[in-house]
Amino acid sequence: MPIPDLSSCRVVDLAQPYYTGIPHHPAHPPFLYGLNKKHGDYVNPGGASSASEGIALGAHVGTHIDALCHFSCDGRMFGDVEAAPVQSYAGGLERHTVDMIAPIFRRGVLLDIPKVAGLDVLPTDFVITPRHLDAAAPDIRPGDVVLIRTGWGRYWDDAARFISQVHSPGPALEGAEWLSARKIFAAGSDTAPFEFTPSPEMAVHVHLLVRSGIHIIECLNLEELAAMGAKEFLFVAAPLRIRGGTGSPIRPVALVDRESLGNETNQ
């Protein structure tokens, strides 16, 4: 897509905030925060003082992107790479790692599934099917970043509700096949697992990451974007260069051309 005129764009933050107690999938460690130096603990001769903190988190906590090496099936990763010889606890993975993902500047597309389904937010047991995706989809092109809204972004400040014992709406395998058939770059959503869960086999992750080479982005905040009525935009995000990493936090933004929005959202 052409480079937008920034003066004609609205910039929409698609990231959820980090704070102690944020939701996290139980397969990953939580976000931890501590202020380890307060103002006044040490004061320079001129009166200046500083504060600083320490943080710890899993690479798949908060708004983040999955590298292709995040999943394997039958011991093999994307491209039929055998996982065992290219991994170590100290060094991570050697192939398809998150530091190999270049900064992302791609056409983004929002699929607002609750709007299609006539709902405000999808219920826990809602499976997103190709029929829903067809109804929500504008023109999807190879290389796009496709973002699927379920409405669960509004539950972010209620960790128990957001995780719901790892039960959440999302696409099952047929929905993942619909996405991969369009040869997209990445698929994202506003839930923690992306795919419909419970999903013991994690079939969607296997299909997208292992079989198709399509990245997954999770824990997005898509509420403002949906409220604007945005359907396509410039998606911008950059993973941290974590050598050997299987994923990384990101701070994605959408640059939305104001002319593509209704008059009521341009005020």
Image: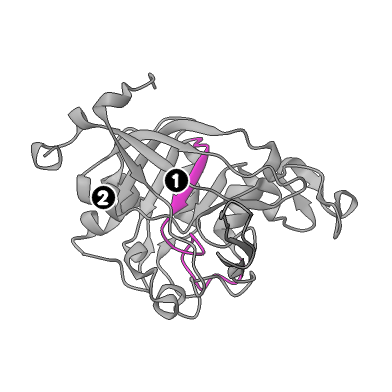
Image coords of residue 126 (percent x, y)? 35, 68
Residues in magenta, as a range: 183-201
The residue that label 2 is drawn on is 226
In the image, residue 184 lies in the stretch drawn in magenta: yes
- In percent of the image, x 48 and y 59: which residue is there? 194
In the displayed orientation, state which residue is furthest to the top: 2
- The image's mark for residue 147 is none
144 relative to 117 in the view: left or right = right
Distance Cα–Cα, label 2 vs label 1: 22 Å
**Image quadrant containing the N terminus:** top left
20 relative to 90 in the view: left or right = left
- Crowding near the residue tagged with mark 1, few <14, some 14–19, many ≥20 C-alpha atoms within 10 Å: some
31 relative to 144 in the view: left or right = right
**Image quadrant containing the C terminus:** top left
Image coords of residue 147 (percent x, y)? 40, 47
Q: Quadrant of residue 200?
A: bottom right
The residue that label 1 is drawn on is 178
Q: Nearer the viewer, residue 143 or 103?
A: 103
* Amino acid of disc 1: Trp
Image coords of residue 145 (percent x, y)? 45, 39
Magenta segment, prevailing SS (helix, strand or loop): loop
Q: Nearer the viewer, residue 160 or 19?
A: 19
Of the image marks 2 and 1, the number of the one nearer the N terminus: 1
Q: Quadrant of residue 47?
A: bottom right
Q: Is residue 236 visible?
A: yes
Which colour style is shown?
one colour
For residue 226, above or below residue 261: below
- In percent of the image, x 21 and y 64: which residue is there? 119
- In percent of the image, x 77 and y 58: which residue is there? 74
